[in-house]
Image (tube, grey):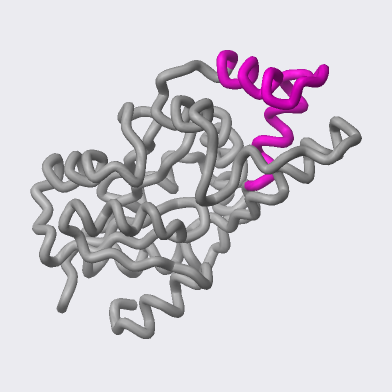
Amino acid sequence: MKYKAIIFDLGGVLLNLRYENTLDKFSEILEKPVSPFYTQKEQTELFDEYEKGNISSDEFRLGIKKIVGEEITNDQIDEAWNAMLLDLPIKRVEMLKELSKKYRIFLLSNTNAIHIKAFETIVKSTLGNDFGDFKKLFEKGYYSYEMGDRKPHPSIFETVIAENNLDKSDTLFIDDSIQHVEGAKKAGLHAHHLSDLNVIKFLKDEGIY
């Protein structure tokens, strides 16, 4: 067995995402085109600070209001911000259950308080249970806003490695963002860029699942 541990990203690997939905929703609310201030590869300092937990949700919303330069409510901001979050396919949940029998599996996500609240609702609609049941699928889950750090900084990978006594030589990291994969490699991990958003196919092709 080549790997003993697998670290999964959340959005774009386990949870389906469409980043464009957020900009589309802002444009719909504001009734005008919105410049792409948030994409998969690039974002402003506001989003970095929010994902590291350095600013509160209210401070984040205030920052959004400054960016769009229009009257917009907190609820509308949350609606647009969460629009990128789609579904959690049950077959990926079943995959995690099976993998946990053979591998140590972890979650490492760049995320924030608003998204986690919305994700909890998605989990409940998918599993029919609370968020705790999803968390139990992993040996441990790591969220950037709770850690004060974020991908692609190698330091966040080093934290996960150190806290769980992982061997870099037999640990695999999977993410849909190439910059995060490059950060993991700098930390010494095996890393795969999931460009087609089909994690089950990749794991089967590699003989892991």
Extreme-right residue of the structure: 31
x, y percent for residue 79: 73, 33
Residue 152 lies, in percent from the top left, at 34, 46
How far across and how far down the image is residue 6, in percent? 26, 61
- Drawn side of residue 87 relative to residue 26, left or right: left
Q: Quadrant of residue 163?
A: top left
Q: Nearer the viewer, residue 174 or 187?
A: 187
Examine the rendered structure and indicate whether residue 202 appears above or below residue 58.
below
Left or right, 79 with reference to 171 = right
Which residue is pictured at 47% across the width and 17% down the height? 55
Could you tell me which residue is drawn at 11 percent across and 43 percent down?
162
Q: Magenta stretch mostly in which secondary structure? A: helix
If the image is split into quadrants, where does the N terminus sit?
bottom left
Q: How many marks?
A: 0
Identified at 52% across, 57% down, the residue is 12
Any magenta on residue 116? no
Relative to 49, say whether 109 is above or below: below
**Magenta region:** 58-84
| Residue at the image point whose x is 45% and y is 57% from the top | 177
Magenta residue check for 74:
yes
* Horizontal arrangement in the rendering, residue 104 relative to residue 115 (left or right): left
Residue 145 or residue 30, whichever sits in front: 30
* Residue that protrudes farthest toward the front in the picture: 35
